Image (cartoon, rainbow, N blue to C red):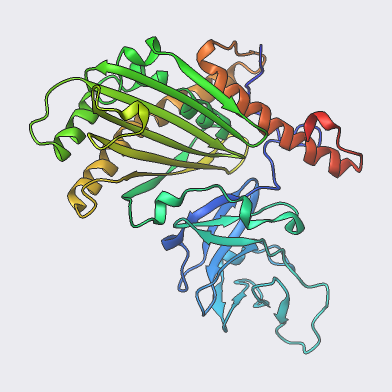
């Protein structure tokens, strides 16, 4: 029995890991003309670009009177000016100008967070900057590979981010939540395999010789006009800590070798998901659907984006309702089914990350069990 209620961001019970990379924005959202305000893992940020195009993430509170820097203006090659009293800070967070005085207080600084632009996203590390290793950014290479095409959106989820991870790690809910598009009975009737290590969890499910649901039948006909017949369908869910899930999905003509690796007689997509907690009750859900067929068709890109957007709208409604029910029943504990195995491992990994940070913050050694 596992308590899946919303966690509180306290020293005793942190809500999310801080020593981790989270997506703060799509790359096109962070510009030179305007400052973007975002809160990631409880940390208010002011996001902008320097004159040479480098993304910057500063704490969204001026050193002087905590006025939001995101309400200010960009100045010089890499600076930002407070909208209240005109103090200016460079991209490293150091104050470079104080109106009406020549001496700058050396303590006048705001936090500057590690930022990396990769896979069409701007990633931010809200924790200890000395631990920020870009090599640990989750692999989402399909997002900027010439062999894949697609697009996505952002959902402001009114639910704890771990509820979104639960949703993505167990796709049997498609049978009930998405019955008119991607759901079918075989989802809950088929076997699945779960593998994991200390940072990743993979759930693999194959369904053989079945009817394609409406979403996949349309995609098959986009590639194979007039297609009729049975398909082999796959879902390979790949979690990367702390909150990125890449889902390898598709269907192929039944018996043509897809389970053995030959997907040439089918259509293959990757659902790219990365969820950034805003606080313990809300999250930003960045997603995209990428495909490796008909790459030159903007029409297919648009149709897939809007189709998946509709599917995820159904998830959003369910997650919002679930969060409200959790808050109305604070003492309730969830019970787990076999289908929850992948999500349970995800929660264990996240909890170990949180526990390791809590122990370090307390100044004690990290036990082997939580490393």
Q: Is residue 336 above or below residue 77?
A: above
At 36% from the left edge and 16% from the top edge, which residue is drawn?
187
Task: Please identify the quarter of the rendering in which residue 185 is found.
Answer: top left
Vertical order, 228 against 296 (above or below) = above
Locate residue 44: give its quadrant. Answer: bottom right
Direction from residue 45 to residue 215 in the image, left or right: left
Look at the image and tell me in which quarter the N terminus lies.
Answer: top right
Q: Name the residue: 51% across, 79% down.
A: 52
Q: How many numbered marks, from 0 up?
A: 0
Q: Is residue 163 left or right of residue 175?
A: right
Dividing the image into 4 quarters, which one contains the C terminus?
top right
**In the displayed structure image, the side of residue 90 where residue 368 appears, left or right:** right
14 or 75: nearer the eye?
A: 14
Residue 26's x, y, as percent? Answer: 45, 56
| Residue plotted at (54% across, 51% down) | 23
Viewer-proximal residue among 146 and 152: 146
What residue occupies the far bottom of the structure in this picture? Answer: 102
Q: Which of the two residues, 66 or 211, is positioned nearer the viewer here?
A: 211
Residue 86 sits in which quadrant?
bottom right
Question: Residue at the left extreme?
Answer: 226
Residue 36's spot in the image, x, y percent? Answer: 51, 61
Left or right: 178 in relation to 123: left
Percent x, y for residue 230? 19, 19
Which of the pair 146/73 is nearer the observer?
A: 146
**Image coords of residue 123 (percent x, y):** 56, 55
Whether 37 is drawn above or below 157: the answer is: below
């Amino acid at each position: 029995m596992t308590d899946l209620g919303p966690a509180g961001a306290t020293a005793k019970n942190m809500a999310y890991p801080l020593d981790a990379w989270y997506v703060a924005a799509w790359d096109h959202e962070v510009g030179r003309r305007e400052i973007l305000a975002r809160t990631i893992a409880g940390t208010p940020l002011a996001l902008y670009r320097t004159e040479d195009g480098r993304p910057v993430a500063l704490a969204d509170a001026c050193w002087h009177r905590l006025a939001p820097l995101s309400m200010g203006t960009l100045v010089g090659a890499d600076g930002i000016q407070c909208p209240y009293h005109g103090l200016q800070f460079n991209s490293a967070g150091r104050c470079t100008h104080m109106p009406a005085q020549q001496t700058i207080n050396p303590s006048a600084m705001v936090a500057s967070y590690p930022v990396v632009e990769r896979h069409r996203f701007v990633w931010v590390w809200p924790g200890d900057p000395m631990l920020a290793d870009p090599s640990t950014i989750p692999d989402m290479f399909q997002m900027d590979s010439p062999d894949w095409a697609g697009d996505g959106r952002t959902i402001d989820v009114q639910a704890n981010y771990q509820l979104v991870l639960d949703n993505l790690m167990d796709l049997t809910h498609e049978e009930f939540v998405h019955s008119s598009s991607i759901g079918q009975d075989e989802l809950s009737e088929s076997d699945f395999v779960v593998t994991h290590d200390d940072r990743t969890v993979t759930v693999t499910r194959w369904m053989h010789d079945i009817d394609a649901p409406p979403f996949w039948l349309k995609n098959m006909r986009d590639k194979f006009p007039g297609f009729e017949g049975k398909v082999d369908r796959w879902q390979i869910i790949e979690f990367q800590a702390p909150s990125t899930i890449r889902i390898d999905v598709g269907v192929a003509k039944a018996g043509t070798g897809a389970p053995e690796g030959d997907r040439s007689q089918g259509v293959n997509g990757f659902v790219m998901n990365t969820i950034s907690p805003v606080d313990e009750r809300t999250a930003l859900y960045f997603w995209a659907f990428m495909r490796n067929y008909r790459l030159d068709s903007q029409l297919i890109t648009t149709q897939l984006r809007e189709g998946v957007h509709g599917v995820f709208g159904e998830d959003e409604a369910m997650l919002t309702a679930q969060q409200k029910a959790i808050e109305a029943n604070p003492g309730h504990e969830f019970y787990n089914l076999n289908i929850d195995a992948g999500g349970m491992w995800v929660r264990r990994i996240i909890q170990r990350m949180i526990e390791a940070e809590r122990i370090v913050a307390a100044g004690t050694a990290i036990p082997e069990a939580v490393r």
